[in-house]
């Protein structure tokens, strides 16, 4: 009888354990919802920094609507292109689209962008809790305000290391010139750099000094517009909040800080971080972070929030918002003083913070110990026929008129260069000097990678033609990667310090000046995927590569993904 009771007790424990495992790791979201959204993309005049600019809005909003879902939910977004002269494609940045590459939203890679008067319906499952974003992936439209935030919450009862009330923060920079003007400048001979942005925005609000323009016409620059009053983040005293922060800048790397408050970093790009405390958060275009902020300061006043440009010599005033300790009033005559932020060129501090980001054990899997393939990618600034470009291993990549994945699935010939993209570079290259011969080539070639294998990417930075080395945030579509390390100078495999124990997994990572970044990922998502610098001008000028693996496993292209280039002949009547 005692033996039977003991057996029953063990069985009961096993049943409880199995139920717990099912509830926390295996069982699908039984309450999964389908979010049906209809977005009208239009031109709208906005005064986001007091200056009147033609922006691109979704349902009249810039930034666009916030998507708030639960892991396992299905998102269906019908995007109606009501622009008069531009196509539209929207990328769901950080959503891996496992087996669903047709919905990644990248023009010329897996879809033809929706033409004016047309529409495109995206459908995907949000399979990872975390903080993500969406933005245009057509031309340089992101700089016109076509972007927004995605929050994916864990399942009810799902074990998480933290759960606090959210506050959403979108950081962006803002140019007064249009994306058209930028494209013309960058494509000119001689080359014309677009310059630094006029303003920095927090949640779509900034403040440009209209008097700098010598403009008295309030229709062109209106300092009293309610659109450009500082954003207000409302909090209550003695509480802890989760600030979900996303950088949608088109150029600028930023530092984010809150007057008198420290931040505990707990998540980046949807992945849990070993928590660490900091006074400021360095954040690069395409990155997301969650930080915990405790409102433990003097509750009789409000506090300033600021962002400032780093990694480039700043010519743009700091951005400003208000941390409002309720019920304190908002007094326009006595605004809190925003913290100035750190030095723009303290690269060691910026690199050290990136090195401090580790994966939280139990939530982030350890990487494979070895790689099946290694790619060494050198980023340089070059010329092609007198035009200035950016290149990877001396190749400036261009996107074809016919989307790559459609061409692969339908066997459409002569769409892209079949020559293999270069997997390495001449390691005698002096990263500290501009070479005597800056000429590069252009190509639409791709990297063919074996499916379900481990691949290392060693990004190497060098001096640009402007006389310095720039920070480049690199974003990979369709995958997360382990960040194995950062280093100064040229990468040396025998001396490089790599973290194989608890590296963080991300989808966007900085490459620091005159340094290297080492990444590792699994080619476990069939299709063809972009890997590119997230700075709009650098992407436009060719700082990108394409990774193909397992595309034979992908379904035939949907009709809505076609209609451009050579795909016109494959549209059913």
Image: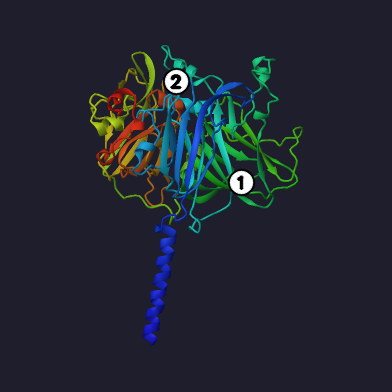
Please report the residue visible at 67 percent of the width from the left and 14 percent of the height from the top. 214
The residue under label 2 is 466
**Looking at this view, is 220 or 121 the one in front?**
121
Residue 540 appears in which quarter of the rendering?
A: top left
Residue 341 appears in which quarter of the rendering?
A: top right
Left or right placement of residue 143 versus residue 454 in this view: right
Q: State the residue lying farthest toward the front.
A: 573
Residue 533 shows in this picture: yes
Dot 1 falls on a residue whose secondary structure is loop
Residue 237 image position (x, y, % from top left): 69, 50
Left or right placement of residue 326 versus residue 13 in this view: right
Left or right placement of residue 197 versus residue 229 in this view: left
Residue 399 image position (x, y, % from top left): 34, 25
Quarter the C terminus occupies: top left
Residue 239 image position (x, y, % from top left): 65, 52
Please report the residue visible at 57 percent of the width from the left and 42 percent of the height from the top. 168
Residue 424 shows in this picture: no
The residue under label 1 is 262
- In this figure, which colouring scheme has been used for the structure? rainbow
Dot 2 falls on a residue whose secondary structure is loop
Whether 82 is drawn above or below 342: the answer is above
């Amino acid at each position: 009888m005692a033996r039977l009771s003991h057996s029953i007790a063990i069985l009961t424990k096993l049943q409880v354990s199995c139920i717990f495992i099912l509830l926390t790791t295996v069982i699908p979201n039984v309450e999964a919802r389908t979010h049906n959204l209809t977005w009208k993309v239009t031109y709208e005049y906005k005064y986001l920094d007091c200056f009147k600019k033609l922006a691109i809005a979704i349902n009249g909003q810039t930034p666009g609507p916030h998507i708030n879902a639960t892991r396992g939910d299905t998102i269906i977004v019908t995007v109606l292109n009501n622009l008069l002269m531009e196509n539209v494609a929207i990328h769901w940045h950080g959503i891996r689209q496992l087996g669903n590459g047709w919905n990644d939203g990248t023009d010329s890679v897996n879809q033809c962008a929706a033409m004016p008067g047309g529409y495109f319906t995206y459908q995907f499952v949000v399979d990872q809790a975390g903080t993500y974003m969406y933005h245009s992936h057509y031309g340089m439209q992101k700089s016109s305000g076509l972007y927004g935030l995605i929050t994916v919450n864990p399942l009810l009862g799902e074990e998480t290391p933290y759960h606090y009330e959210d506050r959403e923060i979108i950081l962006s920079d803002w140019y007064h010139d249009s994306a058209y003007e930028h494209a013309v400048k960058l494509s000119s001979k001689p080359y014309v750099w677009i310059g630094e942005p006029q303003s920095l925005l927090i949640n779509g609000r900034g403040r440009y000094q209209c008097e700098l323009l010598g403009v008295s016409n309030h229709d062109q620059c209106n300092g009293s517009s309610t659109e450009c009053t500082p954003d207000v983040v409302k909090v209550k005293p003695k509480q802890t909040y989760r600030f979900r922060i996303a950088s949608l800048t088109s150029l600028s790397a930023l530092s984010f800080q809150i007057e008198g408050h420290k931040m505990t970093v707990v998540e980046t790009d949807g992945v849990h971080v070993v928590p660490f405390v900091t006074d400021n958060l360095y954040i690069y275009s395409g990155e997301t972070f969650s930080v915990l902020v405790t409102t433990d300061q003097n509750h009789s006043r409000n506090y300033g929030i600021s962002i400032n440009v780093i990694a480039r010599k700043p010519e743009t005033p700091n951005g400003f918002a208000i941390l409002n300790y309720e019920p304190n009033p908002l007094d326009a005559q006595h605004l809190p003083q925003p913290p100035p932020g750190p030095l723009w060129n303290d690269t060691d501090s910026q690199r050290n913070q990136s090195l401090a980001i580790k994966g939280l054990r139990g939530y982030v899997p350890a990487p494979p110990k070895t790689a099946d393939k290694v790619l060494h990618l050198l980023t340089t600034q070059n010329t092609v026929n007198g035009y200035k470009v950016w290149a990877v291993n001396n190749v400036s990549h261009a996107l074809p008129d016919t989307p790559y994945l459609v061409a692969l699935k339908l066997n459409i010939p002569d769409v892209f260069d079949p020559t293999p993209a270069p997997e390495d570079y001449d390691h005698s290259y002096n990263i500290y000097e501009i070479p005597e011969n800056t000429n590069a080539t252009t190509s639409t070639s791709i990297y063919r990678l074996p499916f379900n294998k481990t691949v290392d990417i060693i990004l190497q930075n060098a001096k640009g033609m402007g006389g310095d080395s720039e920070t480049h945030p690199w974003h990979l579509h369709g995958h997360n990667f382990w960040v194995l390390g950062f280093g100064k100078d040229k990468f040396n495999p025998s001396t490089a310090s790599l973290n194989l124990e608890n590296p963080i997994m991300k989808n966007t990572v900085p490459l620091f000046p005159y340094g290297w970044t080492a990444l590792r990922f699994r080619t476990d998502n069939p299709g063809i995927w972009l890997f590119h610098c997230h700075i709009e001008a650098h992407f436009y000028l060719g700082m990108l590569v394409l990774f193909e693996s397992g595309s034979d496993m992908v379904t035939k292209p949907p009709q809505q993904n076609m209609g451009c280039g050579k795909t016109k002949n494959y549209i059913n009547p």
